[in-house]
Image (tube, grey):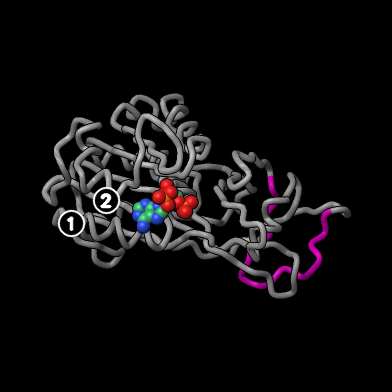
Amino acid sequence: MSLDASNQPDFAIPTGVFAETVTSIEHYTDRLFKFRITRPASFRFRSGEFVMIGLPNAEKPIFRAYSIASPSWDEELEFYSIKVPDGPLTQHLQKIQPGDTVLMRKKPTGTLVNDALLPGRRLWMFSTGTGIAPFASVMRDPETYEKFDDIIVTHTCREVAELKYGQDLVQALKADPLVGEMAHALRYYGSVTRQDHDHTGRITDLMRSGKLFDDLGVPPITPEIDRGMICGSKAMLADTKAVLEGFGLQEGANNKPATFVVERAFVD
Ligand code: A2P
C-alpha cells in the first residue's frame, strides 16, 4: 500500500491488520452508504463472510463486523454500511473519501456460506437494512446457481429509497460476467414497513400470513426443498429464525450443515 503525504494514518497500523485504500463511495440515503476498498493480494474469503473494519484514527482503533458485499472473485472489496450520527465507527466512516485508508483485520469468518447448508432445491436469503450485504456477495457467486435451482432474495427496509442498493445489484446481475444467464434463477422481493409500496410489511409477518408465498406464486417453505440464510438486526434474526423453525427448518453451522443459517454481522 502507498499513502501520499496528505493521507498518512494518524497512528501506526496494528499488527494482523491490512491498511487498504478507499476507491469509491456512494451515498444512498442519510442513513446508508456503500464503499469499496483495494483488496490485499493475499486476502481470500468465501462469499457471504464478514471481516472486522476500522479506521486508523486512534492508537487502538474501533473495529466492527462488516459483511463483504463483493463476490469472492472481485478485485476490490465492497461494503454496505449504515450511518449512525454518534456511532463509534460509522460517525467517522461515513465521511471517508477516495484515497483514504481503511483498516481490515486479516481473518474473514461467518456462517452465511453455502458450505453451512445441506443441499436443497431452493435458497431463501432473508435480509433487512444493511443485512443485504452478505447476499450481495452470495448472489454474485456462480456457485450459488450451481447448487440451487431457485434463489429468492428478500429485502425489507423502512423506506423505499433504502431498497435501491439491492435493486441495483439484482438489475446488474444479468450483465454480470460470471452469473449472466443463470440470473434468471434469482427472484427479488423487496418490502417496506414505513411507507406505501407494492409490498409492505415485516418479512416475518409476510411469511406467517403466507402473503410472501402468494405474491411469489410458490408453495410455503418445507425442509425437503428449502434452505435459508438470515441477516438483519438481532431482533429480526431471532424472529425470522423462529418462523423458519416453525416451517421445520433447523439451524446449521460450518461444522454442522443444516437447513438454515443465521448471521450476526451487523453494525449498530
Ligand atoms: P419496522 O419498520 O416495523 O421496525 P432497521 O432499520 O431498524 O434495522 O429495520 C429494517 C427493517 O427491518 C424495517 O423494515 C423493520 O421494520 C424491520 N424489522 C425490525 N425488527 C424486525 C423484526 N424483529 N422482525 C422482522 N423485521 C424487523
Q: Nearer the viewer, residue 222 or 173?
A: 222
Is label 1's Cβ within 8 Å of ligand 1? no
In the image shown, does 167 or 76 lie closer to the viewer?
167
Q: Could you tell me how many numbered marks the image carries?
A: 2
Asked whether the beta carbons under mark 2 and mark 1 sit within 8 Å of each other, the answer is: yes
Is there any visible trace of residue 47 in the rendered image? no
Q: Is residue 8 magenta?
A: yes
| 28 sits to left or right of 2 | left
| Magenta stretch: includes residue 219 | no
The residue that label 2 is drawn on is 228
Q: Is residue 91 left or right of residue 137?
A: right
For badge 1, the amino acid type reads: Leu
Residue 81 lies, in percent from the top left, at 57, 51
Q: Amino acid at mark 2?
A: Gly
Write down the residue under mark 1. Answer: 249
Q: Residue at x 29, y 64 (%)?
A: 253
Q: Nearer the viewer, residue 46 or 262?
A: 262
Q: Looking at the rendering, in which quadrant would you find the N terminus?
A: bottom right
Q: CA distance from mark 2 to mark 1?
A: 8 Å
Q: Badge 1: how crowded within 10 Å, few (<14), some, or many (20+)?
A: many
Query: Compared to 15, does 205 lie above or below?
Result: above
Can you give x and y, in whole percent of width and height, for residue 212 in the image? 25, 38
Identify the mark nearer the N-term, 2 or 1. 2
Mark 1: which secondary structure? loop
Residue 84 located left or right of residue 246: right
- Residue drawn where x is 27% and y is 48% of the image: 205
